[in-house]
Amino acid sequence: MLRTTIRSRASAVALAAVLAATVTGCSAEEGADSATGGGDGITVQAAQFSWTAAGLTNSILSEIATDRPELGVATLQTTQLDPAAAWAGAQRGDIDLLTEVALPNQQELAEGAADRVEIVSQTYGDAAQGWFVPAYAVAPGGPLEGLTSVTQLNDYADELGNKFYDADPGYITTEQNAKRLEGYGITLEHVVSSEAAELAQLENSYSREEPIVLYLYHPHAVFAQYDMVQLEEPTSYTEGCLTTGDGACAMPSYSANIAASTELQEQAPQFADLLVDLRISVEEMEQMQKQVDVDGEDVGTVARQWVDEHATQIDEWVG
């Protein structure tokens, strides 16, 4: 969830207008050359969400396309967009490829572009998301000792500084968390700024071994840095709970998917077949995220390493 974002309709329209001015759709280009490909084939306009997993997936596909010109793709031209703008571009025909599509979070957006773009594969599934606290905080003698469930958070409000930390205001998960706080009757202040600010607060609290509660999701490099504990939920997720329901339920596990335009599937069918077969596990993605976000390695270098290590599997996918 990966993280999942969705902005207001007005914001999406504004971003879509910018997108329309800067990208065109899937186009055949002879002898196209770029840092992300080369040789004969089409240029694929790919949306790139702001989280590291999206950049890694796009880079992996770019490396494979470069290695295998028979797939018919010369270049993946990426444009960083939030999901609302990306799906608006896909619906308009400006975007051919979307990776790291989080479902069910982006389901409504995907349905809006279904006449031009379809979900073709799931790269990984069963990715957990929810509310987390540092393991030291709930250990015996810790400031949150005894805390196991989200429903207990009011009892630890003083220790937590009466704050619950969340990511960007445009994320659909932020909207869900606001509803969950209300549904559970939790009175902690919902601190919303950005994921960078949220993680900076976690780093500061962790370095001081102070208590903190915040929203996190798998796969994420944060779990390679810190020992975190997910709080239990008294009620499982059910469809509609976080939309038309009262919000007093767990967040759904989600899957990361690939969506491709019908035009892309027609112009580069072998590349489209690869998209159907591509699989990257949550564990593999978190290891790559650690390499990029913690160890400071280049996304392209890490993607190249993954491609080299999975050469036999890629041979099978390509056929």
Image (cartoon, rainbow, N blue to C red):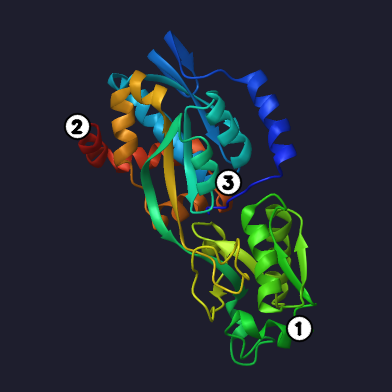
Give the mark nearer the N terminus: 2 vs 1: 1
Q: Which mark is residue 100?
A: none
Amino acid type at image mark 1 = Glu
Amino acid type at image mark 2 = Gly
At numbered mark 1, what does the secondary structure look like: helix, strand or loop? loop
Give the mark nearer the N terminus: 3 vs 1: 3
38 left or right, relative to 190: left
In the displayed orientation, state which residue is furthest to the top: 30
At numbered mark 2, what does the secondary structure look like: helix, strand or loop? loop
Labels 2 and 1 touching (C-beta < 8 A): no
Amino acid type at image mark 3 = Trp
What residue do we see at 73% from left, 74% from top? 208
Cα separation between marks 2 and 3: 31 Å
What residue do we see at 54% from left, 71% from top? 250
Q: Which residue is mark 1?
A: 159
Q: Nearer the viewer, residue 157 or 308?
A: 157
At numbered mark 3, what does the secondary structure look like: helix, strand or loop? loop
Residue 124: x %, y % from top left: 38, 52
Q: Which residue is mark 2?
A: 319
Tell me if residue 271 comes above or below residue 84 in the rendering: above
Q: Which residue is mark 3?
A: 51
Q: Nearer the viewer, residue 72 or 284?
A: 72
